Structure formats: C-alpha cells, structure tokens
Amino acid sequence: MARWTLRERIRGKVNRDSYESLDAAVAELEGRVGRHERGAGAQPEGGGLMRRIDPVQQVVARLELAGPGRIRAGVDVRGDGSSEAWTGRFRRELVEQRPGETAAGALQRTLRDRVG
C-alpha cells in the first residue's frame, strides 16, 4: 500500500506524519488548513525603507503531501486567511479551484487523477 507523508511548515518548524491512504492524508491536511485559515491574521510587514508585504503575500503555513512516484503537492495558507493548492516540487503549478471547492478538495481531485 502506498504511504503518504504530510509535512506542516510553520515559521521554521516542521511536523511530519505518515498515512496509509490518500484520503486519510487529505482529511488531516484539510483540518489543519482550516485551523490555520481561521488563525491567520497576519499584519502587513515592512514599509518605509523596505518593500511592504501585505498579508495576502505572506505564507503563514505550508502543508505538503509526498506520495508514491515522487508526487509532491500541497496547500499554502496566506496571512489573510486564504489558501491555494499547488503541485510540483521545484516548479510549482497552482491547482485551479472549482466553484464551491476548497483548496484541499481541489488538491485531492488533482491527486486522484494522477494516482488513479
């Protein structure tokens, strides 16, 4: 059976957990994304001498799934509470969200198509 690893990166700290199925890994990822979205509340950084970085430009949490066949995909939670799914390791491609679909749901749909 394929194993999936979920890495959660928050301000330099990394947590890793393993799951036996894609469904279990995505369910955990979705719960964590929701928790980070509710608690995002980042403030603008910089200004004055350095470039201003608005909350929508800040990644407050990155959740990455690694699976069979070198699959890499994940969800970035932004400082304003929004999130976006992506695939790839070095060249990340955004996953298009359909109306009414969460970032985790879009990621799961994309990974199901790849894994089969």
Image (tube, helix red, strand yellow):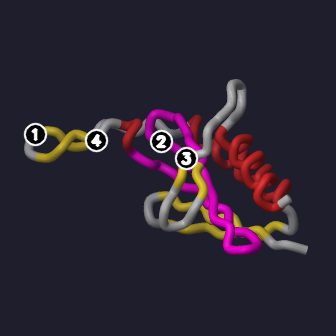
Residue at the spot x=79%, y=53% of the render? 113
Residue at the spot x=57%, y=38% of the render? 37
Measure how far apart labels 2 and 3 are at the Cα level: 14 Å
Q: Give the residue type that dot 2 points to.
A: Arg
Q: Residue furthest top?
A: 99
Residue depth check, mark 1 versus mark 3: number of the one nearer the observer: 3
Measure how far apart labels 1 and 3 are at the Cα level: 32 Å
Instruction: From the image, tell me which residue sits under label 3.
Output: 94
Q: Is residue 22 rendered to the left or right of residue 73?
A: right
Residue 25 drawn above or below residue 95: below
Q: Residues within 10 Å of mark 4 (few under 14, many from 20)?
A: few
Near-viewer residue (12 or 62): 62
Measure how far apart labels 4 and 3 are at the Cα level: 21 Å
Helix, strand or loop at mark 4: strand
Label located before the other in sequence (4 or 2): 4
Measure how far apart labels 4 and 2 are at the Cα level: 12 Å
Instruction: From the image, tell me which residue sits under label 4.
Output: 53
Helix, strand or loop at mark 3: strand
x and y percentages locating residue 19 in the rendered image: 81, 67
Instruction: From the image, tell me which residue sits under label 2.
Output: 78
Helix, strand or loop at mark 1: loop
Residue 93 drawn above or below residue 41: below
